[in-house]
Image: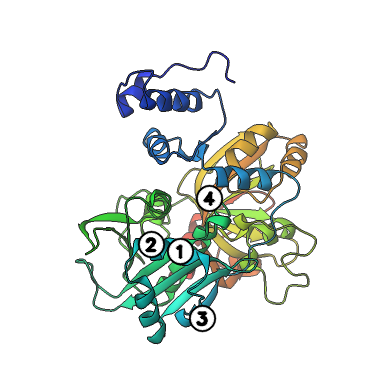
Amino acid sequence: MLQAPPAISDGQSAVLGRVAPTSNDGVDQQLLAAVGGDAAEYLVSEDAGLHNRARQLGVADRVLTAADAIALLHALHADLPTPPPSVRRVKTHELNLADPVFDALKGDYPGFEDWFKKAARSQRDALVIDGDHEHAAIAILKPEPEGAYGLAGPLLKVCTFKVSDHYSGQKYGELLLKTVFRQAHVEHDAGIYMTVFEKHEQLIELVEDFGFQSLEQRSDLGELVYAKRHGPMPVGSMDPLDYHVRFGPPALAIKTGRVFLVPIAPRWHRVLFPDAEPDDALFPATAGLTIQPFGNAIRKAYLCHSSSRLLRPGDVLLFYRSRDEKAVYVVGVCEDVMVSHDAEEVAAAVGRRTVYSFDDITALADEGPLLVIQFRQDRVLTDPIDLEEMITAGVVRSWPQSITRVKQEGEAWLAQRLDG
């Protein structure tokens, strides 16, 4: 029970309109006012309309579904979820059409089973994340060399994209998208698109967060068409973070003086970037650690005690694995930064994207103020950049002991090294 909850602000009314206080919309607005007025960290609701209003107000990260809230609590406390399996690339016929993950699709699309069998016979590619005894998430893909909906080809169409309700909140949708983006990049597709019914608001929110935009056209079934240009595009005056979201990953807008080396100990590198674990690593990524779904997601958070206050949204981050490998395996793009010594404040800020438990965060905060870096993973380098190579190219003078700005004389070499 909130004592003396905040009133609905004029700014909120300007965005959402004025409504009768006792109406359903009025109650929703009062709940959102409690979030916007910082009387509560999170609001948990299954009301899709309320989630839409939260997005309009810019507080969507603090309005959670029940599944997201459960995943958040699991992430921050003991009894953590088991590691997510990798995405497996299969043929459509290897999927189980009787699996519960397809039930909603059969209801949405008349003739879905016949379409599925046709796709299976044509050896169409699919992606699957395995659950305990069922499909946790699936995607069925189709290359369209000639393009569609006025979009120039070649395109990668995501024909089917579904996360089982039982696995909601585990970042599996993001994990699937990560694999789709990687495929589009490798195959040099000009774009990616999918069609989706308006009622699937969580899927729409997910794809919009990763640069998909709604087209004017609709599918023959009345679905919205969401498309994303992919690959290198002219940067111009575009904001570096917006550029990355719109055209990547991978897509970097490297600005002079805005590239940084971020040293990270092997222990945290393994859990934050399990897909970047060296093939010849002495210990597997899971050795002695509990890995969460966030490790395989795109949106992540890293905590450290660096005294640097230079980072800002859009900066390119080169995560330098210290001590053992002494090389950059992963590149990211900064989304936001904050400094705090309050473990609860840090947990609230990064709880939906962190690999750190609440005990980890508390222990780190006890050692001093934390620099919280929220970022998007841009790519895992197939050819890591080692320290000796960076010193020779003038990127740095020596091994980075803290967050270090890349030297201007090394930026051109680095941009070429990261090209493609």
Q: Which circle's residue, 3 or 4, is located before the other in the chain?
A: 3
Q: CB of mark 1 within 8 Å of CB of mark 2?
A: yes
Residue type highlighted by circle 3: Glu
Quarter of the image where one finds residue 207: bottom left
The spot of residue 39 in percent (x, y) is 55, 22
Q: CB of mark 2 within 8 Å of CB of mark 3?
A: no
Q: Give the label on residue 103, or none.
A: 1
Tell me: 145 left or right of 83.
left
Residue type highlighted by circle 2: Gly
Cα–Cα gap, marks 3 and 4: 35 Å
Q: CB of mark 4 within 8 Å of CB of mark 1?
A: no
For disc 4, the marked residue is 375
The spot of residue 320 in percent (x, y) is 64, 59
Q: Which circle's residue, 3 or 1, is located before the other in the chain?
A: 3
* Quadrant occupied by the C terminus: bottom left
For disc 2, the marked residue is 107
User: Which numbered mark, 3 or 4, is in the foreground of this view?
Assistant: 3
Classed neighbour count for the residue bearing mark 1: other residues with Cα under 10 Å, few (<14), some (14–19), many (≥20): few
The spot of residue 183 in percent (x, y) is 44, 73
Label 2: state its secondary structure: helix
Residue type highlighted by circle 4: Phe
Cα–Cα gap, marks 4 and 1: 35 Å
> Foreground residue, 116 or 231?
116
Classed neighbour count for the residue bearing mark 3: other residues with Cα under 10 Å, few (<14), some (14–19), many (≥20): few
Tell me: 392 left or right of 102.
right
Label 4: state its secondary structure: strand
Q: Is residue 287 above or below residue 236?
A: below
> Foreground residue, 215 or 48?
48
